[in-house]
Amino acid sequence: MAGHRVAHATLKGPSVVKELVIGFALGLAAGGLWKMHHWNEQRKTRAFYDLLERGEISVVHPEE
C-alpha cells in the first residue's frame, strides 16, 4: 500500500489571456456604468437649465 498515489489537483500559474479577458470585461462594465451615470447627470442639468430659461423656475428667492 505504500506505492498508492493520491490524486491531487495540480496548481498552475495565472493564465495571462484569462486575466486580460477578465480585466477587459470589468473595465468595459465599469466604463459603461460611469457613462450611464454621466449621461444621467447631463440630462438633469439640461432639464434644469431648460426650466430656468422658460421661466418656470427661479434661483432667486422671492422677497416677501
Image (cartoon, helix red, strand yellow):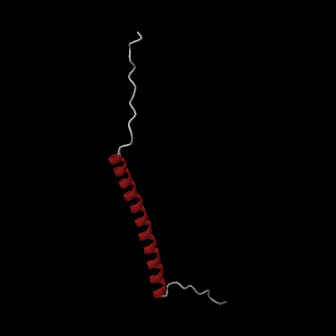
Identify the residue at image location x=38%, y=42%.
14
Quarter that holds the N terminus: top left
Identify the residue at image location x=37%, y=58%.
28
User: Residue 36 in the image: x percent, y percent?
Assistant: 41, 65
**Residue nearest the observer in this picture, 2 or 53:** 2
Q: Report whether 28 appears left or right of 52.
A: left
Q: Residue furthest top?
A: 1
User: Residue 37 in the image: x percent, y percent?
Assistant: 44, 66
Q: Residue furthest front?
A: 3
Q: Report whether 45 appears left or right of 63.
A: left
Q: Residue furthest right?
A: 64
User: Residue 43 in the image: x percent, y percent?
Assistant: 43, 74
Identify the residue at image location x=40%, y=66%.
35
Q: Is residue 26 above or below residue 52?
A: above
Total numbered circles: 0
**Residue nearest the observer in this picture, 51 or 21:** 21
Q: Is residue 36 above or below residue 26?
A: below
Quarter that holds the C terminus: bottom right
Q: Is residue 45 above or below residue 17?
A: below
Q: Is residue 4 above or below residue 12?
A: above
Identify the residue at image location x=37%, y=48%.
19
**Residue nearest the observer in this picture, 16 or 55:** 16
Q: Report whether 13 appears left or right of 48.
A: left
Q: Quadrant of residue 61?
A: bottom right
User: Residue 10 in the image: x percent, y percent?
Assistant: 38, 30
Q: Residue furthest left?
A: 17
